[in-house]
Image (cartoon, rainbow, N blue to C red):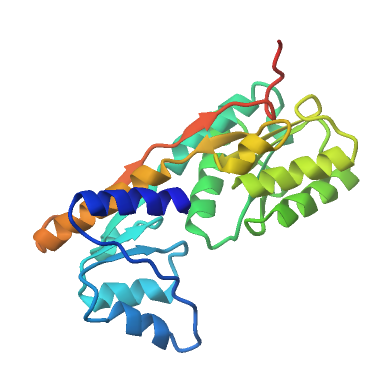
Amino acid sequence: MTWLLHGADEEATRLGYHLMMTTIAKSDDGHARRQIVGSALIDALLVVITEAEDPLAHDVAASGVPTVILDTDMSAQGLDSVILDNERGTRESVEHLLRWVDASRLYFVGGPRGNFDTIQRARAFTESVAHLGHTLSPEQVSFGDYSLDWGKEWGIRMSRHKKLEGAAVLAANDKIACGIIQAATDAGLRVPDQLRVVGFNDSQISRLVRPRLSTISLPMAEMGAMAVRLLVRRIENRSAEVVCSKLPTKLIVRESSTVVNF
């Protein structure tokens, strides 16, 4: 999120606009959200929506305020959107991990079921494996939350069932991946010799953990900048064509998924 805001703020400053940020807390009746969305002090909105069913999506669509949605494609609802190409990074990761393990030992450990990124990543994972001629069992795709604790919980459970050793995992974010590595280490398994792990986000933790975490890099600063450019375009031309911009992701291979020879 830091890099997203940094990219958006820099681009807004370059284009002569001032960016203000707020976290709109959820409420039972949604009054606080509607009050901010409908404020006359706001010229335009950049809104991060992580779940397609979020009531905020309806509020911003009905507000009439120039809006760009980040993380969810709402172009069909008439709102410019900026999303990540989750398919590309996921596909690269699946191909990378299947160099080392059989498809039956490959797992995806996701965040919440309703989260847009988790939905996209789980679908891309399943389709990538199927494209290579394999069929996944239900237990090879799991959902939880975006936390280290969830990753550790999943890793402990799999270790108890003797399914962690000799496996490979694509986690939906770096925190989940680090939790899995911690569970494997506590169980006496060596990463990457006995378990290979790839995360998502290329966050700072991916470079601090040992072994360093292979992960899918996300262009968050460019995402923020692109959103601002689309927003300024919408401010200056209310009738411009509605677009959805998809930004590329990329697998960064480090020690958690491949043995490095020095």
Whether residue 260 sits left or right of residue 188 in the image: it is: left
Q: Is residue 67 above or below residue 26?
A: above
Number of numbered markers: 0
Q: Tell me which residue sits at (84%, 38%) in the image.
A: 185
Q: Is residue 164 above or below residue 155?
A: above
Whether residue 7 sits left or right of residue 65 in the image: it is: right
Given residues 251 and 53, the one toward you in this image is 251
Q: Is residue 243 visible?
A: no
Picture quadrant where residue 246 is located: top left
Whether residue 241 sits left or right of residue 36 in the image: it is: left
Residue 258 x %, y %: 68, 22
Q: Is residue 96 visible?
A: yes
Whether residue 78 sits left or right of residue 137 in the image: it is: left
Residue 95 x %, y %: 57, 26
Residue 226 x %, y %: 28, 48
Q: Tell me which residue sits at (67%, 59%) in the image.
A: 144
Q: Tell me which residue sits at (27%, 81%) in the image.
A: 38
Q: In the displayed image of the protein, which residue is found farthest to the top?
A: 262
Residue 47 x %, y %: 35, 64
The quarter in which the C terminus is drawn is top right
Q: Tell me which residue sits at (54%, 53%) in the image.
A: 118
Picture quadrant where residue 234 is located: bottom left
Given residues 138 and 186, the one toward you in this image is 186
